[in-house]
Structure formats: C-alpha cells, structure tokens
Image (tube, rainbow, N blue to C red):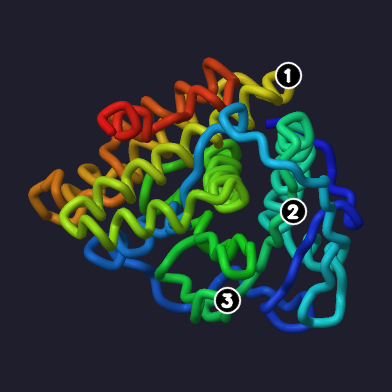
Amino acid sequence: MRLDDFDPNAIDVEDQRGGGGGFSVGRGGQVGCGTLVIALIAAVVFGVDPSQMLGGLSQPGQIEQVPGGEAAGGGGAAESCTVDAASRESCKALSSLNKTWAPLFQQANIQFQRPKLVFYSQRGSSGCGSAQSAMGPFYCPSDRGIYLDTDFYQQMDQQIGATGQFARDYVIAHEYGHHIQNLLGMSDQVHSLQEQNPRQANQLSVRLELQADCYAGVWAAKNRDRLEPGDMESGLNAAHQIGDDTLMKAAGRRPVEAAFTHGSSQQRMQWLRKGMETGNEDDCDTFADIRRSR
C-alpha cells in the first residue's frame, strides 16, 4: 500500500523503548507454535470496544484534534517513527487512518480524538495494565492507545504466515477500528451486556472484533487509489491466519465455536472483504440482528 509519509505534528506517538531509540529487532526467545501463539494473536485484535455505525449516530460535538504527542524518551513522533522501517511504516498507516476517519466524524457531527500509537519492546505499560509482547498489538480504551511491539511483524511473517505490508497495515487499521468503536460510545453498553449475559460474552466479543475488521476494510477502500496488486489478498490471508479456528488447529486443539473470541477465519475474511468492497462504515453493523430481535 503506497502511503504518504507521516506528518509528525499530525500523529500522536509515545515511545517506551527507551529514549525513543535503541530498538533491538533481534531479541532472544521465539514464540513457539502453541498456546502462546494463540495468546499472541488473540491480541492482534485485543481491543475490546464496541460501536455502531457513524451514519446511525448524530451527537452534537466539535471535532477535537489532539496535538502531536511526545515520545516517553524525550523525542517526538519524528524520532520515534524513524527508529526502523517497521516504526515508520506503522506511523504512515496511523497518519492515513487519522486523515480518513476524522472527516467522517465531522460529517456525522461527532467529536473526534486521535488515538496515540505506543511503541514498546517486550514489556511496557498502558492505561489498561501491563503490555507484554506475547499479547500482540492491542487497543486500550482508557488512554486511547494502540500498543505495538513491532517484533510482532516478524512473528506474523515467519510464524503465522501473514505476509506482506498490507497485512501489517491491517493490524494497525484493526486496532484503530477499536478506537472508532470507543469514540462512538457503545463500549459500556456492550460490556454491560456481557456482564448480564456471561454465556454470550464470547459471541459479543466476536462481533466487536469482526466489526473492527470491517472498519479496517473501509479504511482500505477509502484509500483504494493507494492499494497495490496483491494487497487485498495479503489482508485476507492475514485475516484467515488469525481466525480462532485456524489458531486452535495450529495449536493442536479442536476448534470449538463457543470458545471463539475473535471469529473464525471465514468470518474475519468475510467482514474485512465487506469493508473493502463497500467502503461504507454503515455496512459494518455486526450487531444488526441483535437489535432487530429486541
């Protein structure tokens, strides 16, 4: 995907890797193909925050753009985003996502706030507790942060079989989808439903994750002129590789739908494809049948 370079003043970045630099790509210890891989991928989409469609909400509010953040190590986005190629790539995706989603919120008259991208290595801290590489990328609604250890990209390529730049862009776009859900204000409602109906908690989680997949596809569709041959296939392959059933099989477990929290490979591909084909965020309503049944 051919994305413009980032504007350091238009994105919010925090760096917990130490001084905004010194990031070591080669660290000891590889994540094996087993339960740890499932834990790691389960958090490719770990942000647990819901939403409804932008077109279905119309709450008064002004667009709020938060000033660019400073890295924890003293440098700003310009320094943190240029530590290595993976960091720059992630910041370019973040910049594109901001440019794509902010106008949609403005059109719907809903307040928009940019998320921050937080780089860390092996261990970090978030508003939702500790961040660990084994968790994979995740979104924390408490501080509106997308947390990423970029070593995860190597694991995607070498261990999971999710290759290509767009597969990596999809990871950021999915977590950004959880930010969209959080801003739209249905997080507490869905969490409340999960508490009221513990047996359906996993099903509700799956709906959130599939919607974030769809939102990732919408972002890609709205930047269709930036897509390159093979991008759609790369994204769909990544969605397939991180489906609950595929991960369970890779770990030597029998897939059990009741235990799914992120959706099957088929479901994840379906909703990512839907977003990419329609380019319409209103088509990402994974909760429609629940509302109709009420």
User: Image check: 123 left or right of 286?
Assistant: right
Q: Give the percent coordinates (x, y) of residue 255.
A: 12, 46
Q: Amino acid at mark 1?
A: Asp
Q: Disc 1 designates what residue?
A: 225
For marks 2 and 1, give the CA distance: 26 Å
Numbered label attached to residue 113: 2
* Label 1, label 3: how far apart the Cα atoms are: 35 Å
Question: Upstream in the sequence, badge 1 or badge 3?
Answer: 3
Dot placed on the residue nearer the N-terminal end, 3 or 2: 2
- Label 2: few (<14), some (14–19) or many (≥20) C-alpha neighbours in 10 Å: some
Tell which residue pokes out farthest to the left in this image. Answer: 254
Report if the CB atoms under discs 2 and 1 are less than 8 Å apart: no
**Which mark sits nearer the N-terminus, 2 or 1?**
2
Secondary structure beneath disc 3? strand
Q: Which mark is residue 235?
A: none
Of badges 3 and 2, the one in the foreground is: 2
Q: Mark 1 packing: few (<14 Cα in 10 Å), some, or many (20+)?
A: few
Q: Residues within 10 Å of mark 3 (few under 14, many from 20)?
A: some
On screen, residue 12 above or below 277: below
Q: Residue at x 34, y 32 (%)?
A: 291
Nearer the observer: mark 1 or 3; the answer is: 3
Percent position of residue 221, x then y: 62, 22
Q: Nearer the viewer, residue 274 or 165?
A: 274
Which residue is tagged 3? 126
Real-space Cα separation, disc 3 to disc 2, in angstroms: 18 Å
Indicate the amino acid at tag 2. Answer: Gln
Which three-letter amino acid code belongs to the residue tagged 3? Ser
| Residue 200, image x, y percentages | 21, 50
